Amino acid sequence: MMLTNQTVDHFRTTLLWPLQIRPGFYGDHVQPIRDLLTAEGQAAAWKLVDDEFTKNPLDFQERHYKEFITFLPAVQRFLYGEGRSKSRSPDDPALPAPVEVYRRRDVKGLRVWVHPESDPVFLHTAHLDLYLFMDEDVVLLNLEVWADGLPLPQVLDLLYRFGRAYPAGWSDSGQGHHNLSRVEVIGLHDEVLAVSDSTERDRYLSFVCEHRAPFVASQWRFLLRPLVLDHGDEPGELRFRQVEFYRMPMMVFLAMPNPRALIREDFIHITQVAHVQPGDPISPSDSILKNLEDQYFYDRYWTDSEQGPNTRFICTGSTLMVVGESQSAHFMDAERGILAQFRHQHFVLFMIAHFHRAALLSFSDFLSEAINDLDVRNPTSVKRFKRRIWATFQNFLTFTHRYWFHQVSELGHVRALFEMTRSHLGTDDLYEEVKEQVGGMSDYLDSDSEREQSEMVIRLTVVTVIGLIFSVVTGFFGMNFFAMADESVWIKTIYFILATAVTIGMLLISAGRSRHLAELLDKLSGEQRRGPSKHRSSDKTKN
């Protein structure tokens, strides 16, 4: 199917890639991520982004203010931290936000070839950030790029192939399927910092065969350094692995001269750009065509008239798109208009929703890994399992009370887009599932602790019974059973050491054999013999 060949005056996309942080090849603890990212000092690629709220108030922009007041107080404290009242506690420091942002400024853009025979397209880098969440094993890579004056079919083809961590397969000529033909990472001085390796088919196949894990393309590995692939051989304390599908969630901003000229088939391909290759036919019976507008479109600002506004939001969960008029000053305004909202308020709600999902998937993955590593016959494995479960339980409580939000804003369109994103991602159902898993593990630990306490009580009871025998015997003969009042101090000391050693030995033997002694005491109590005798007596009564 041919798409409407309309020029996209301004195209902008934001990739948001959730990743799980791993502790390395061995051990359960690593340094804080912030220390590893900044370990190289001034030469480190990632730099902590200064919070706008700590800078000179004269530099504080209106777009930052609008972003701040958009969200509810709990979300504000999550995103920006909280200051202290100078009148009540002037010496208390401000509470930092539990989310930190690190940024790379050494990448000017990406030079991409959609197909081997196509001309290269230069994508300017607006942001290259890494979002860290305290007490969580999840990071989000945020890459925002833009370009101007591209035809709509080319933009959709680029979007379809852009945010993929690795090729889906290869053609006979060795070209990767569904990914960009070639990607070059360009530095500030137009130097090539990294080149994609999607044509190295054997390398991808051998890695998956050896490690049972996917191999990430070279341009993404470069952008994530010093984070290194968990299953790879590259040394590094801070390791990452996939937590979701290899197709990265993305936001898209499309500014066109006349969006009203787009037909329904165009919007279908825009909506499904992450899953359906532009131009491919879609069957009329396809389920995505049913209630398309009700499921994915938010048309509060779409009037389809010359007076406008003609801004359409499209949300599928994995994508959040906005289509509008490039001639509209409000739509293109980067300080107060839709473009400013897209880069700030809309990005934040999209980031929160995908962080929720990634964190919940990470919890579930961690529980599964703990179960797979458990060997009930190995005491060390059991102890490690218990430590992992308790740590997961504590982190899940932290996540619930610090990061989990059902609502982020009272503004109509922000609230609606957040609810649509969460609904398509299924985070509520996923939360209940993980909560049940964590609760089941916690119940297991509680029952196991009760079992250990019960066994300890049995052992102490057996030891008390054994000790009672010696206490009664010595008490019967009295304290002067051995007359040693006239003996020397050395003789008394020797007898004291011998008596102490015998007593300790008897206690240790009785404690070590407490389970068998408990069974013996149970048999001596006659409980097992009374049961059959009662049955025999009841049978005689019946006869």
Image: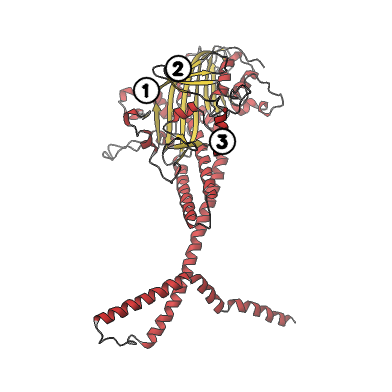
Query: Which is more toward the observer, 430 or 498?
Result: 498
Could one spot residue 203 in this view of the protein? yes
Q: Earlier in the sequence, mark 1 or mark 3?
A: 1
Q: Quadrant of the C terminus?
A: bottom right
The answer to whether marks 1 and 3 mark residues whose Cβ atoms lie closer than 8 Å is: no
Residue drawn where x is 71% and y is 24% of the image: 284
The answer to whether marks 3 and 2 mark residues whose Cβ atoms lie closer than 8 Å is: no
Q: Is residue 388 above or below residue 53?
A: below
Q: Amino acid at mark 2?
A: Asp
Which of the 4 image quadrants contains residue 132? top left
Using the numbered discs, state the Cα–Cα distance from disc 1 to disc 2 in whole angstroms.
14 Å
Give percent across and percent down for residue 537. 68, 81
- The residue carrying mark 2 is 333
Q: Earlier in the sequence, mark 1 or mark 2?
A: 1
Numbered disc 2: secondary structure: loop
Q: Earlier in the sequence, mark 3 or mark 2?
A: 3
- The residue carrying mark 3 is 208
Give percent across and percent down for residue 118. 56, 14
Could one spot residue 302 in this view of the protein? no
Using the numbered discs, state the Cα–Cα distance from disc 3 to disc 2 in whole angstroms.
46 Å
- The residue carrying mark 1 is 61
Q: Amino acid at mark 3?
A: Val
Give percent across and percent down for residue 282. 68, 23
